[in-house]
Image: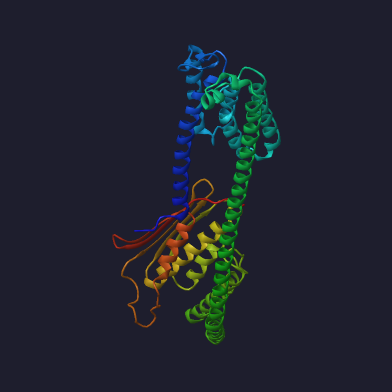
Amino acid sequence: MSASNPSSARSRGRAVTYTAGSIALLIVGAVLDICAVANVPGAATYPTVDGAAGGTLRITPVGVGIALFAIAAWFTVLWRRRHPLVVVIAGGVLAVVGTSYLLLLIGAVALIRQKPTKVVPIGAVVGGSVLLFALREALTPWGGALPWFLTTSIGAVDSVEWNVAVIVCALVSLGIAAGSVALTRTRDRAERSEQRAAVQTQRADVLAEQTVRQAERERIARDMHDALAHRLSVVSLHAGALEAAADEGVTGQMARTVREQTHAALQDMRGLIGELRSGADAESSAPATMRAVGALVAGLRGAGHAITSLILIESPERAGALFDGAVFRIVQESLTNAVKHAPRAPIDLIVQVAPESGARIRVVNPVGAGVPAGAPGSIPGGGNGVLGIRERATALGGQAWIGAYEGSFIVDVTLPWQERG
């Protein structure tokens, strides 16, 4: 079993906490605003005897309507992250009605988190609304709920102590809201800093990996140069000497072909070494191109191989570099594979390239016509040619079918067209 992603587990934990907190705010806030219905003149009656409490507080039909509206308004707290403005509007209506400004403060904190650049205007509007609410309770008949429930005396509504208490509660509430905003912004900045640090760490890991890969490419390039360049140069030198010593018959032609192909192999190897030392995306000194397919076929024919070819290439100048090089390399490897395993057999080659249809490469040769492995003239192989063809096709989003069918070995590759950038 694979370990769970820590960030996903943390996100799920936050979602659960947010949902639980929202439900708690809904319940507590709705209960408080139902109790605060008594703040609104005409929403409740205070039964008294000689100015003191003498019975049960009664909610009028107006108070019932306000209580139901308060419950509905508090449901908006469930969406305070996605739609904080709705919460602010609902809380503002409750403050105007006269129950409380608690929902307004909660919505303001959420709105500032969504729009951090608007903290000053939002804070000014909400702070002014809360202070106006407190002044209305202190200077008008509004605001009788708190003195009634704490002292059961209506006369306390007009006392200086309760008027001061109302103002102090408003200031404390604004301070708590401002502290919540500051805490939230600090936490958000910390999370953003953590995310930036994670991105920088990932970039550093990528750069380190690229450095290791480049060092490996340098090592492979040195090994290729030291191990192969000398041998190919010696083969080319002796082939040139053999060509000069031989007559113009078959032997001379074969010596000339060996020299030309060895020289071409040297050029290809130098290009590959250049790619390895410059990076995977660098251009080699001798880039492969589909324009060279004809010359490749002509060189093999000159070496005595029977190749029947149909080559139709349209708009090669429009092809992307990777696509262009892949077409040539796939044709080259397919023909090399056919020559290696069936040197005496005829080879059929079809290359069709067009912007509308992409590339189609098909190489067919008879099975069983080759030189037995280990016999004189046989060519050793590592089995990497077919794998390389498949990998090139897959890398460009194409398909490769390679295998024996009805006595023939077939390489059939299709590549989607890639336009030059």
Q: Residue at x 53, y 23 (%)?
A: 148
Quadrant location of the N terminus?
Answer: bottom left
* Numbered-mark total: 0
Q: Residue at x 54, y 65 (%)?
A: 295
Residue 184 or residue 220, whichever sits in front: 184
Q: Nearer the viewer, residue 184 or 251?
A: 184
Q: Residue furthest left?
A: 406
Q: Is residue 365 above or below residue 95?
A: below
The answer to whether residue 13 of the structure is visible from this angle is yes
Q: Position of residue 407 (x, y in %)?
A: 29, 63
Q: From the viewer's perspective, tell me whether residue 308 is left or right of residue 256.
A: left
With respect to residue 3, does 65 lie above or below?
Answer: above
Percent across and percent down for residue 73 are 51, 25
From where the camera sits, is residue 343 visible? no
Viewed as shown, does residue 83 lie left or right of 116? left
What colour scheme has been applied to the protein in the rendered image? rainbow
Give the image quarter of residue 120.
top right
Q: Position of residue 206 (x, y in %)?
A: 56, 63
Residue 238 image offset from top left, x and y in percent: 54, 86
Pick the residue in front: 3 or 335. 3
Residue drawn at point x = 58 percent, y = 57 percent? 199
In the depicted structure, whether residue 368 falls above or below residue 158: below
**Which one is nearer the viewer's eye here, 261 or 118?**
118
